[in-house]
Image (spheres, rainbow, N blue to C red):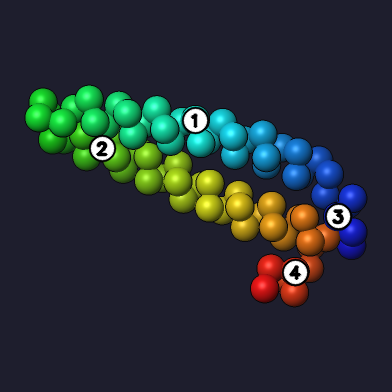
Amino acid sequence: MSRGDYVTELKTARSQRRKLITMFEKLCAMSSEWDGLSGAQESETERLAEAVSEQIRRLDDDIAYWRGGGSKEDLD
């Protein structure tokens, strides 16, 4: 398959990746606001930020796969 076969997937993934990065940055800022006030809130907000970060990594993997035309060899 060619890269052109994944145009819609790439466009959607890149758009969502940008939004997730914004969410991650905001969650990190929110977590730091809880520093010294509520350890539980700080920890839970950090946990949410890490979950968003994991999704960004998964999207990065998918983007690399689709950019390579769907070939596993293109990921190496």
Residue 10, above or below 2: above
The Cα atoms of the two marked residues, 3 and 4, are separated by 11 Å
Give the mark count.
4
The residue at the point 51 percent across, 36 percent down is 21
Which residue, given by chain and number where applicable, does mark 3 sit on?
Answer: 3
Picture quarter with the N terminus: bottom right
- N-terminal of the pair, mark 1 or mark 2, is 1
Q: Nearer the viewer, mark 1 or mark 2?
A: 1
Q: Could you say whether the residue bearing mark 2 is in a helix, strand or loop?
A: helix
Which residue, given by chain and number where applicable, does mark 2 sit on?
Answer: 44
The Cα atoms of the two marked residues, 1 and 4, are separated by 28 Å
The residue at the point 72 percent across, 60 percent down is 65
The spot of residue 22 in percent (x, y) is 49, 30
The Cα atoms of the two marked residues, 3 and 1, are separated by 27 Å
- Identify the disc placed on residue 74: 4
Say what amino acid the circle numbered 1 marks. Thr
The spot of residue 12 in percent (x, y) is 71, 37
Q: Could you say whether the residue bearing mark 3 is in a helix, strand or loop?
A: helix
Which residue, given by chain and number where applicable, does mark 1 sit on?
Answer: 22
Picture quarter with the C terminus: bottom right
Say what amino acid the circle numbered 4 marks. Asp
